[in-house]
Amino acid sequence: MTLYPQLIIDALKTVRYPGTGKNIVEMEMLEDDMRIAGMHVSFSLIFDKPTNPFLKSLVKASEAAIHAYVSKDVEVEINTKTITPSQAPQESENEPIYAHLGNIIAVSSGKGGVGKSTVAANLAIGLARLGHRVGLLDCDIFGPSMPKMFQVENERPYSEEIDGKVMIVPIEKYGVKMLSIGFFVDPDTPTLWRGGMASNALKQLIGEAAWGNLDYFILDTPPGTSDIHLTLVQTLPITGAVIVSTPQQVALADARKGINMYTNEKVDVPILGLVENMSWFTPAELPENRYYIFGHEGVKQLAEEMDVPLLAQIPLVQSVCESGDAGTPAVLDPSTPTGNAFLQLAARVITQTDKRNAERERTKIVETH
């Protein structure tokens, strides 16, 4: 059995606070700090005061609900918190969670459907093929796609005690260490989480995973701008962003927003470059022909306008979609035009990252107020 947060939340919805008739989830007594490691789950319940007369009974009722509605084998650890205005988060004395992650590259798009995850997967594998140690984090909490792209949908990361801490061991394939929320949720059930819980799950995948020493840590971010992006820039010093768009005007408008999000003075993450995906359509039977379905060189023009490099123009060919669905990304065969384009993309990202690091200091984490 695989535990995931929604299972626990559904069980806790059966626990009612005496006298109100409302359940403890509805009353927002469940803190956004849930941790799951194998069959062990820990979380906190929030009370108005340490002398709340129902504190002990609600803790017992919550544990009983999980055993009744999830499994008797679940090891439940429940902490209690009293929220007061004077409470403030304490900084950790340990080294930062990003100390061994190397260059942290966010692959972003202003809108969905432009092939951002395809680019992220092929970029990560391309970097690994060029001899680098690479980690890939699927940050799309509500629509994870990396397990399918790597053909590891049935894999389940396990936990291992390392230096006295229980750590999640990433799945490794094609030379890339990879984690996704898709490994921990039911693929047929929508993920209905509040923003805080989604952000907390993401932080756990970053800070409680055995990534080891990496050269590149690729973030496949959700489309658009959201809580997840804010969590990332508040958690990690992102080295640079790669923006993916099609040449279509509506996609370019959203790409500008994505660029502005990163270059905003409060965030200040440099843009390594743009990737024009689906630049043209080339039918298999006419490999020399190019049909500009979504417009002609729109991203190239945007790159010139924004004064950032154009890293790659990726053609739209049927094999890219098929290889992604089959879990064999196109870059695995660099003899094909698309595979070669992705490998060249990886090489240019390395060049731009080295140039960025020579010219600028490490990006600062956005402070939380």
Image (spheres, helix red, strand yellow):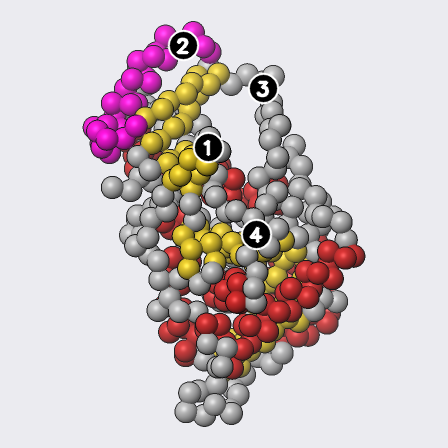
Q: Amino acid at mark 4?
A: Leu
Which circle's residue, 3 or 4, is located before the other in the chain?
3
1 vs 3, front mark: 1
Image quadrant where one finds the C terminus: top right
**What span is in magenta?**
49-75
For label 4, the residue is 214
Q: Quadrant of residue 292?
A: bottom right
- Residue 117 location in percent, x, y? 48, 62
Circle number at residue 87: 3
Element on which disc 3 rests: loop
- Residue 351 location in percent, x, y? 68, 66
Q: Amino acid at mark 1?
A: Lys
Q: Amino acid at mark 2?
A: Asn
Classify 10 Å Cα crowding around label 3: few (below 14), some (14-19), many (20 and above).
few
Q: CA distance from mark 4 to mark 2?
A: 47 Å
Which circle's residue, 2 or 1, is located before the other in the chain?
2
Q: CA distance from mark 1 to mark 4?
A: 20 Å
Circle number at residue 213: none
Q: Is residue 80 above or below residue 69?
A: above
Q: CA distance from mark 3 to mark 4?
A: 35 Å
Which circle's residue, 1 or 3, is located before the other in the chain?
3
- Residue 203 location in percent, x, y? 51, 40
For label 1, the residue is 165
For label 2, the residue is 52
Element on which disc 1 rests: strand
